[in-house]
Image (cartoon, grey):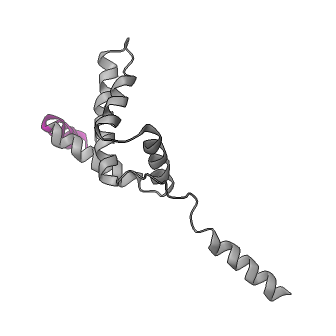
Amino acid sequence: MKKLIFIFVLLSLFSCKDYIDKPANLVDKDLMSEILADLTINDQATFMFQDRNLEAGTRFILKSHHVKPDDFVESFKYYVIKNEMQDIANSAQEILLKKDPKADKYIKEKQKNNGIPPVIR
């Protein structure tokens, strides 16, 4: 009887290998990085135009990358749970720095002065 319970416990442990199922329309990591970079730029526009609704910008970004909002949200959740979001965010930051070389220069200058990277708002 003890062997049977032990086998049942082992089977139940190995049957649950993932916390979340892979979404049907999973957004590729590279595409996710590009979308996050564009969303960051869009987010910065909210500081300039605080009295306006910039939700259309988010919809435009997703539409320009041919991604449905539900697919983006499900892919985001999947990557967060799988602990892959840090790599995607780092890749998005590299994309942003390529788009704006002045930002790269600013960050390196601030790091030289005090060794701490500045908070980009």
Quarter of the image for the N terminus: give it. Answer: bottom right
Which contiguous range is marked in magenta?
A: 101-115
Q: Nearer the viewer, residue 13 or 56?
A: 56
Magenta span includes 50: no
- Residue 59: quadrant of the picture: top left
Q: Main secondary structure of the magenta part?
A: helix
Residue 57, image x, y percentages: 33, 26
State whether residue 119 appears in this view: no
Q: Is residue 29 left or right of residue 23?
A: left
Quarter of the image for the C terminus: give it. Answer: top left
Residue 52, image x, y percentages: 37, 13
Q: Is residue 102 left or right of residue 10?
A: left
Vertical order, 16 against 58 (above or below): below
Residue at the (63%, 75%) spot, across then down = 14
User: Residue furthest toward the right?
Assistant: 1
Q: Nearer the viewer, residue 36 or 120?
A: 36
Magenta span includes 114: yes
- Residue 39: quadrant of the picture: top left
Vertical order, 88 against 70 (above or below): below
Residue 85, image x, y percentages: 41, 51
- Residue 56: quadrant of the picture: top left
